[in-house]
Image (cartoon, rainbow, N blue to C red):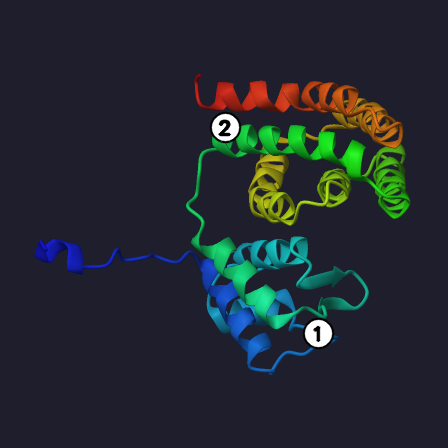
Amino acid sequence: MEILESFKTIEVESPVDKIIRQIRDLIIAGYLKTGDKLPSERRLSEKFGIGRTHIRNAIKKLEFYGILTANPQSGVIVNGTDMVAMQGLITNVMKIESPDFFSLVETRCFMEAFSVQQAAVRRTEVDILKLREALANFEEKVINNLPAENEDFIFHLKIAEACHNSVIKTLMLIVLPDILEMYRRENLCAKEEAGKSLKEHRNILEAIVSRNSNVAKDYMNEHLKDVLEFSKRKLNL
């Protein structure tokens, strides 16, 4: 065996990964329990010796995965989470290679086409209720001209849940946060686009309710067409 093969690749953690790792370790060790509140962004920033933007990004990522909940009134709260599942999930979050935006979007499109087809076949009445609730939350934000990126993505996650394939849901949880961050940076969820997305969400939901899997897939592909084209332009494809 060549001696070079004995060496291991050196992994350089980002500030966000280091924050996530420390929060994970504190939860697993029992220092942070369900219902506990994290210190403020300012205090965490001073403690870590890094900018508040890194703190905010780490919290947003953990919030997206359901590990933390940020509330304007009560602060950032630790949710009740299965420790084994949480440890595996955060490990995946930190170890996944940082892919280009096009790769993320292309992967998302493949998964969404499959998940919406299967959701139309496998969905239960409980799934429909959750999808209608997610759509109503998205609609409320759009009507009130408020940022609706989170509500948009939650609707798509509920479709993944309704397809009843745990691997698809896990993969969606891995790729969606990075796509969401790009959406925010590029302002891809502008008000006029949000109104268009709302109509498309309604069409997708009605196709799922009607158990029309092919129509649901067509609606989903049309819904994601613009962002796929945008991601190609970003990569000069």
**Coordinates of residue 123 in the picture (x, y in percent):** 82, 40
- Residue 37 bears which disc, if any? 1
Residue 134 placement, left or right of 95? right
Q: Is residue 123 above or below residue 197?
A: below
Residue at 72%, 28% in the rendered image: 190
First-in-chain label (1 vs 2): 1
Which of 143 and 91 lies nearest the eye of the viewer? 91
> In which quarter of the view is residue 26 placed?
bottom right
**Coordinates of residue 6 in the picture (x, y in percent):** 16, 60
Q: In this view, does 131 lie above or below 50?
A: above
Residue 50 placement, left or right of 199? left
**Pointers 1 and 2 in contact (CB under 8 A)?**
no
> In which quarter of the view is residue 84 placed?
bottom right
As drawn, which residue projects farthest toward the left? 2
Q: How crowded is mark 1: few (under 14 residues within 10 Å), some or many (20 or more)?
A: some
Residue at 72%, 24% in the rendered image: 220
Residue at 45%, 49% in the rendered image: 96
